[in-house]
Amino acid sequence: MIAEILATGDEIRSGALVDSNSAHIASELEAAGVAVARHLCVGDDLNVLTAALGEIAGRAHAAVVTGGLGPTEDDLTTEAAARAACVSLVLNETALSDVEAFFTSRGLEMGPSNRKQAMLPEGATMIANPVGTAPGFSLEVGDCLFFFVPGVPFEMKRMMADAVLPAIKSRFGKDRETVRVKTLSTFGLPESVTGEKLAGFESAFPGLKLGLRAKFPEIQVKLYGTGRDEAAVGDLLAAAVGWVRERLGDKIFSETGQSMEEAVGDLLRRNGATLAMAESCTGGLIAHKMTNVSGSSDYFLFSAVTYSNEAKMGVLGVSEKTLKQYGAVSEETAREMAVGARQAADATWGIATTGIAGPDGGTPDKPVGTVCIGIAGPDGVKAKRFVLSFPSRRMNKTVFAVTALDGLRRALG
C-alpha cells in the first residue's frame, strides 16, 4: 500500500515553523509496515488545500493530514476535506460534547468559535482528542482513507497512537509488509569516510537499504529491511549489523538509538562508577547533557565551570606554575583539572575540558577549535589535545563535549 503525508499551514509552508510532525508520522507509519511515498506541504488556502487532497486521493491508499482543525478563520482543513469528498459539513454531537467537556474540566467557558471544531464532513468518523480541543476525523475520499489530526505535536502523537495506527493496521493489515529499521550511532568519522568504509553494502545485502544521517556531531548508520517474512528480515538485518561492526569498530557507540550521554551513563552504572567534571571551554555543556538523562543521579556527582585561571586554581587545585608554563589550554592543565574534579567529589572518574571555542582567541600554536581533554580514573590520568574546528562557537562546544564523553566511554570499556 501507498501512504502520503500532508502538512498544512502558512507557518509550515513559509519555514517559520519546522515540520517535525511529518517526520514523526513517517517514522510511525514505516514502523507499522506502511510505505510513505510523499511528504507534501501547503498553506492556508482553501482551494489549494482542496486540490491537494484530491491529488492525494488519486495516488494513495491512506494519508495523514496535520493542521488546520482549530477554531480560527484560517483553519480550513475540515472545509477542504468536505469539498474534496463532495459532502457537507454537519454538526457532530459527540465532537461537540468532547469540546465542551475539555473547557468544563478546566473551569473555562467555551467560546462560540470553538463550536466550529465540531463541524465535520458528512460521513466522517470522529477521532477523539483527549489532550486538546480539536477533534480529528477519518474520511474516505475516492479510494483513499484520510486521517485528519491537529498540528499541535503532542495532540497529533497521542491521536496517532490511540486511533490512526490501529485503524491503519486493521484496514490494511494484509497489505502491510514487515519493516525493520536498525540504527547504529557512530562518532569520530566524517560522513564521507563512513560511507567509504561501508562501500559494497548493497552488493553484500541486496535485500536491504543503507542510509547515512548526519546528526551533528554523530553519524547514524541506518539499515532498512522490508519483506513479508518477519523472521527472514530480522536474520538479514542481524547479519548486516555484524558486517557494519567489522568495518566501523569502536566508532559505534550505540546500536539502540542512545545518545552519547545515555551510552556513557549506562556504562557508569554498569561499572558501579561515579563521575565528576571540570569544564572551561564547554561552559557546563557536558554536565547539561549528562543530567538530561533520567536517573543520572546514580552516577553524576559534581561539576565545576572553572572559566578563569583563578577558578581553576581555587576550586580544582591547578597549580599556578602549570598555568604560567603551559597555559590554560594545555594537556598539563587538563590533567590537573580532571584530577581536581575527581578529588573534589571523591568520584571514580573525573573529566576536564579546556580549549578555544572561537570565533576569537586562537593563535598559530593554538588555533580556534583546539581542545585539551583530561580523564582521571582509578589507574591514573591522561590528557589529549585535539583540533576540531567547526564554523561556529556552538558547534565547537558541542563537538568538544561529545569528544570528552567519547573518551570516557572508551576508558570505561
Image (spheres, rainbow, N blue to C red):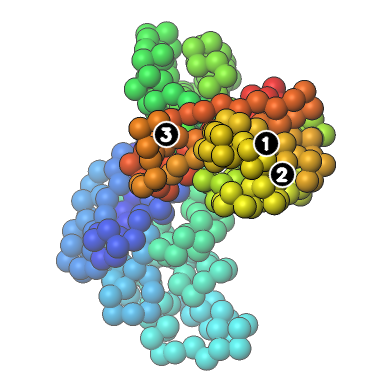
Residue drawn at point x = 31 percent, y = 73 percent: 75
Residue drawn at point x = 72 percent, y = 36 percent: 339
Give how far apart the Cα atoms at labels 1 and 2 are. 7 Å
Amino acid type of the residue that numbered disc 1 sits on in the rendered structure: Glu
Are there few (<14), some (14-19), or many (20+) residues within 10 Å of tag 1?
A: many
Which residue is tagged 3?
366
Q: Please identify the quarter of the rendering in which residue 319 is found.
A: top right
Are there few (<14), some (14-19), or many (20+) residues within 10 Å of tag 3?
A: some
Tell me if 88 is positioned left or right of 346 in this view: left
Which comes sooner in the sequence, label 3 or label 1?
Answer: 1
Residue drawn at point x = 36 percent, y = 47 percent: 360
Which residue is tagged 1?
336
Are there few (<14), some (14-19), or many (20+) residues within 10 Å of tag 2?
A: some
Helix, strand or loop status at disc 1? helix
Amino acid type of the residue that numbered disc 2 sits on in the rendered structure: Gly
Residue drawn at point x = 63 percent, y = 38 percent: 321
Residue 171 location (% of width, % of height): 47, 45
Between 399 and 49, the residue placed more toward the observer is 399
Q: Is residue 143 visible?
A: no
Tell me if 335 is positioned left or right of 349 in this view: left
Residue 406 location (% of width, % of height): 58, 30
Residue 234 location (% of width, % of height): 56, 21
Give how far apart the Cα atoms at labels 3 and 2 are. 24 Å
Helix, strand or loop status at disc 3? loop
